[in-house]
Amino acid sequence: MQSFFSKDGAVCFDCPYSMGSGAELKGCYTHKMHQYSGMVSQLRSIALKHKRWDDIPKFDEGIHAVIVGMCAGKYVRFGTYGEPVLIPIELMRDICAVAKSWTGYTHQWRKPWAYDYRQFFMASTHNLEQTELAETMGWQSFMDDSTHTKHTGMVNCPASKEAGYKSTCSKCTLCSGTTGKGSKSVYIFNHS
């Protein structure tokens, strides 16, 4: 498992909780056994179905349509592990157009090539300075606050311990970028 997550830079880029950025395995809440075992299970399924690398289908309009169909009328959580900005923007638009609701987060909010994702994802920030910068760039933020301070003008995550677990991500969906349900940035006390 340590070896698996040590390669997370390929999908997590420069996330400060990535082992590729020098963080410890326990640093990210997604770096747990269920992520590792899920990936191993998926790889086994692919290997059973497709005996050779060249037999694995390439992403095309047919696969695009299947993915969109799978998301119709459902809650979709983007970026459970890895960067959701790896999803083509056209696919994002189509998924969000048919999904019941969604949530998503990215550490790539400073990168100009990621700006189109503002409509779907929250900027993952870690302090007020980053949050304010992201907001000036047109993003709403989800701030992972290590100071454990209440922030006026922001919503304390209703699915958090400090908010009393009033809701769940799939019911709340405030973390859905600028076109989703939310209209304010959200914060949570650091829980890694």
Image (spheres, rainbow, N blue to C red):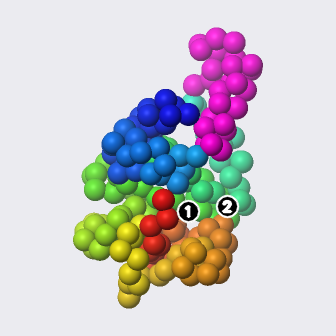
Q: Is residue 2 visible?
A: yes
Which residue is pictured at 37% across the width and 54% down the height?
107
**Quick check: 129 above or below 105?**
below
Which residue is pictured at 59% across the width and 14% down the height?
53
Percent x, y of residue 49 = 74, 20
Q: Quadrant of residue 14?
A: top left
Which residue is pictured at 58% across the width and 75% down the height?
161
**Quick check: 46 above or below 174?**
above
Of the numbered discs in the image, which one, if any, rests on residue 5?
none
- Judging by the rendered image, the residue that carries numbered circle 2 is 75
**Quick check: 68 above or below 160?**
above
Tell which residue pokes out farthest to the bottom in this image.
Answer: 152
Prevailing secondary structure of the magenta residues: helix
Percent x, y of residue 44 = 70, 24
Look at the image and give the residue range highlighted in magenta: 33-58
Of the numbered discs in the image, which one, if any, rests on residue 103?
1
Callout 2 amino acid: Tyr
Q: Quadrant of residue 154?
A: bottom left
Q: How far apart are the alpha carbons under marks 2 and 1? A: 8 Å
Circle 1 SS class:
strand
Q: Is residue 120 visible?
A: no
Left or right, 10 with respect to 160, comes to left
Which residue is pictured at 57% across the width and 30% down the height?
59
Percent x, y of residue 37 = 66, 37
- Mark 1, Cα crowd under 10 Å, few <14 / some 14-19 / many 20+, is many
Percent x, y of residue 185 = 42, 75
The answer to which of marks 2 and 1 sits earlier in the sequence is 2
Q: Nearer the viewer, residue 20 or 87?
A: 20
Callout 1 amino acid: Thr
Query: Where's the N terminus, which quadrant?
Result: top right
Indicate yes or no whether the magenta region holds residue 164.
no
Q: Quick check: marks 2 and 1 in contact, CB under 8 Å?
A: yes
